Amino acid sequence: MTALTLSTSGASALRGDAIVIGVAKGAKGPVVAAGAEAVDQAYDGRLAGVLETLGASGAEGEVTKLPAPAGFKAPLVLAVGLGAEPAKDAGYSGEALRRAAGAAARALSGSRKAGFALPLSGAADAGAVAEGALLGAYAFDAYKTNAKDAKDADTKPNGKNAKSGKNGKGPLAEVALLGGKPRDKAYKAAVERAAAVAEELNRARDLINTPPNDLDPEAFAAVASAAGKEHGIKVQVLDEKALTKGGYGGILGVGAGSAAAPRLVKLSYTHPKAAKHLAFVGKGITYDSGGISLKPAGHNETMKCDMSGAAAVFAAVVAAARLGLKVNVTGWLALAENMPSGSATRPGDVLRMYSGKTVEVLNTDAEGRLVLADALWAASQEKPDAIVDVATLTGAMVLALGNRTFGVMANDDAFRSAVVDAAEAVGEESWPMPLPEHLRKGMDSPTADIANMGERMGGGLVAGLFLREFVGEGITWAHLDIAGPAFNEGGPFGYTPKGGTGSSVRTLVRLAELTASGDLG
Ligand code: BES
Ligand code: MN
Ligand code: ZN
């Protein structure tokens, strides 16, 4: 994990591998951002021109490297694009700083230490830069056995490396925030918050990226139990026996085809002075093959990501505990592996759910709603002030909103807006989606109370309507369908890596903070 410090060092005095500065896109070319004054002076005030000569425009995510001027301890200056220069008197947005810091940290992978001299107009900006840098520095190399990747000169013709050991690069080891105020309480708090959130979010990414042969429901539950011990969170794990005894037909039905049995994990973080109780529920399908309604090749290669909702919930509860938020937060991880076999649930089977309702399973690939239904009902029994579930639930939501935006549905318009606002405040893209009543009848079943599939059109909303049936009477509820943004199959951008992204963790943490401070509901 990348270390982070608030430093009083000037840019020239910092002993490290690089100084990171910001460059924005101005009306007449690149504009050097505040924080880079020392570098600009050392270039005789001509830094903007030098950057322009090197081809820099200030576009978001652009990285330009130049040799540090004489007198600097660090050998390299890395100018990172901040995007359009803000209007006079307006500062850079938190998200612009987060993305720039992330892109810079990514470009510096393999380095030991870098000083970040980005424009800071207050403690919140320091928090944003810290968060972006720690998230951007993330690398998942647990399964790389080569000392360096194939590009390395030592690479053998067969692609194997001469040396053994981990992938050579590794994340940027240390980030020093320059221009921060190490003795200022607000700065310290902002940076500590950023570190706790980023560390837990990165842990969620690790879980998502871990291949399904190493992360089955039991293994996930063990990780949650260990983290609970470490952070004073009560963890209860229902194994297949307890699930059977309790009548959790949805979770058991989805897990029935797998050699790895399902689990329901409950994480309880409590604060003695809490006035409110939030419940987070996460879809935790450690691998989604589709079951008997098998997914075709081309649709199952990334389905280890189908536990991203549970990973987000887990990370958010641990972050809430680490931050000591004055709110009770319960996390429910609905863990199962969806596999076809002789013991698998068939299309046509009827499951008796934890709530007592019966569900006709028409498509075993619509499994997320089945495990969530049991977990939502379990969460409802405690009558929390609100429930938020997070799930990589439907391909339809990806078609509707693309790869970077999650959909938000709710049984309460004000709460749905509050969730969308919370997401925006932390730099996550989301969009409110409706739950049209007329789509409910498409799930009518001739045999059971409801079917697990309805009309194809509006499939993401149909799934939301299904979930709503399993939320306790009178409980405020929102559903986040993160199927698009949970897993990045494209190239990295800003602070978002390839693979597991940790989508919705920051939104959940923000909701917990707002609830703790009494600013939500
Ligand atoms: N895990 C998938 C949804 C998904 C798709 C997640 C793409 C991430 C990327 C989910 O379990 C699923 O298979 N949903 C089906 C539902 C359908 C059978 C009603 C879908 O969206 O096709
Ligand atoms: Mn599925
Ligand atoms: Zn799924």
Image: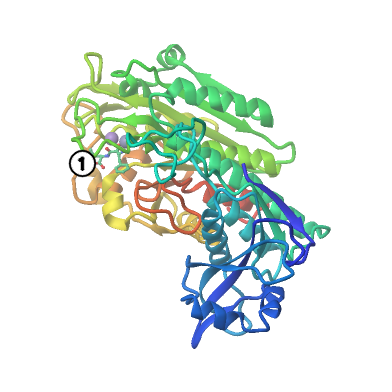
Foreground of the two, 391 or 412: 391
Identity of the residue drawn at 26% across and 36% down = 300
Label 1 neighbourhood size at 10 Å, few (<14), some (14-19), many (20+)?
A: many
Residue at the image point whose x is 55% and y is 26% from the top = 223
Residue receiving disc 1: 454
Instruction: Give the amino acid type for the residue marked by disc 1 in the picture.
Output: Gly
Identify whether 6 is placed above or below 323.
below
Mark 1 Cβ inside 8 Å of ligand 1: no
Q: Is residue 402 above or below residue 110?
A: below
- Closer to the camera, 330 or 486? 486
Q: Secondary structure at mark 1?
A: loop
Of residue 477 and residue 509, the one placed in the foreground of this image is 509
- Name, please, the residue furthest toward the bottom: 28
**How far across and how far down the image is residue 369, in percent?**
33, 35
In-image side of 175 versus 136 (left or right): right
* Residue 472 visible in the picture: no
Residue 347 in which image quadrant:
top left
**Nearest the eye: 287 or 39:** 39
Residue at the image point whose x is 35% and y is 25% from the top: 337
State whether residue 249 appears in this view.
Answer: yes
| 54 lies left or right of 184 | left
Query: Residue 82, image x and y in percent?
Result: 53, 70
Measured from the top left, where is residue 482 in percent x and y?
39, 47
Residue at horizontal 68%, vertical 40%?
322
- The percent position of residue 288, horizontal first and vertical second, equals 31, 31
